[in-house]
Amino acid sequence: GQNIDQPTEMTATEGAIVQINCTYQTSGFNGLFWYQQHAGEAPTFLSYNVLDGLEEKGRFSSFLSRSKGYSYLLLKELQMKDSASYLCAVSPWDSNYQLIWGAGTKLIIKP
Amino acid sequence: GAVVSQHPSRVICKSGTSVKIECRSLDFQATTMFWYRQFPKQSLMLMATSNEGSKATYEQGVEKDKFLINHASLTLSTLTVTSAHPEDSSFYICSVGGQGYTGELFFGEGSRLTVL
């Protein structure tokens, strides 16, 4: 079956670094996405990985290991506005934009 | 990326009434739109795939007669929750697929439905 696991909740300090892990088991693989979702709002796109390695985009980086079915989202220089849920999603097919979603990790930033 | 507008953002209705939610793709012709439902502290759950000019494809367990989807144009899809009940209270979100990355989605603002 299709399964995506990520921690339910994490806490970090403003200015610090946090890594949110995601493991997946899907019938196929055509890319892994990270989305940010603030409470009461729709998700917004953060990153996309389809090849192994690290993709860096400003304060956010995303890593993928396809052989391990593993990804992480790395957030540096944390700001209070980074308090949100972070959703890991996998595209198991090569078309149609259908994604398998993780339950999300709620990140709490403390001063 | 695509700009997606969803309306209304919040709606409160009485049990037994029907509620219509609109999803508009403002700058992108979307042959396919997706409708999600999200309960508190849970992930997005795909309800159905809305196809322009044809019937929507519903996910297993989603009642097509209760959640009516119409995708009459390339820029508008509507979700009607018929005979709403309190258990239908949820956050409903639509999305369209963008160009470039396969699977990148652009979301509407979401609609918070509360059924009394």
Image: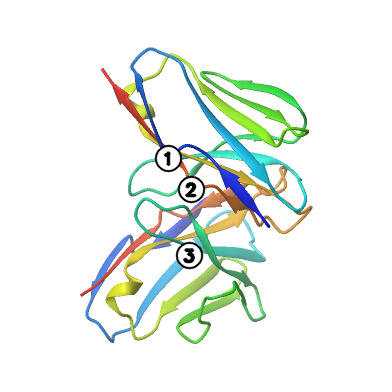
Q: Secondary structure at mark 3?
A: strand
Q: Which residue is mark 1?
A: A8
Chain name for mark 3: B
Chain name for mark 1: A
- Measured Cα–Cα span from mark 3 to mark 2: 24 Å
Q: Position of residue B82 (x, y in %)?
A: 39, 84
- Determine whether B90 is above or below A51 in the image: below
Q: B38 or A8: which is nearer to us?
A: A8
Q: Residues within 10 Å of mark 3 (few under 14, many from 20)?
A: many
Please name the residue shown 59% across and 64% down the image: B33
Q: Which mark is residue B91?
A: none
Task: Confirm whether residue A15 shows in the render.
Answer: yes
Q: Residues within 10 Å of mark 2 (few under 14, many from 20)?
A: many
Please report whichever mark, 2 or 1, sits nearer to the chain's N-terminal start. 1
Q: Give the mark toward the camera: 3 or 2.
A: 2
User: Is residue A15 found left or right of B103 in the rendered image?
Assistant: left
User: Which quadrant of the structure image shows residue A82?
Assistant: top left
Please name the residue shown 71% across and 43% down the image: B101
- Amino acid under label 1? Thr
Image quadrant containing the N terminus of chain A: bottom right
Q: Which residue is mark 3?
A: B23
Q: Which residue is mark 2?
A: A103
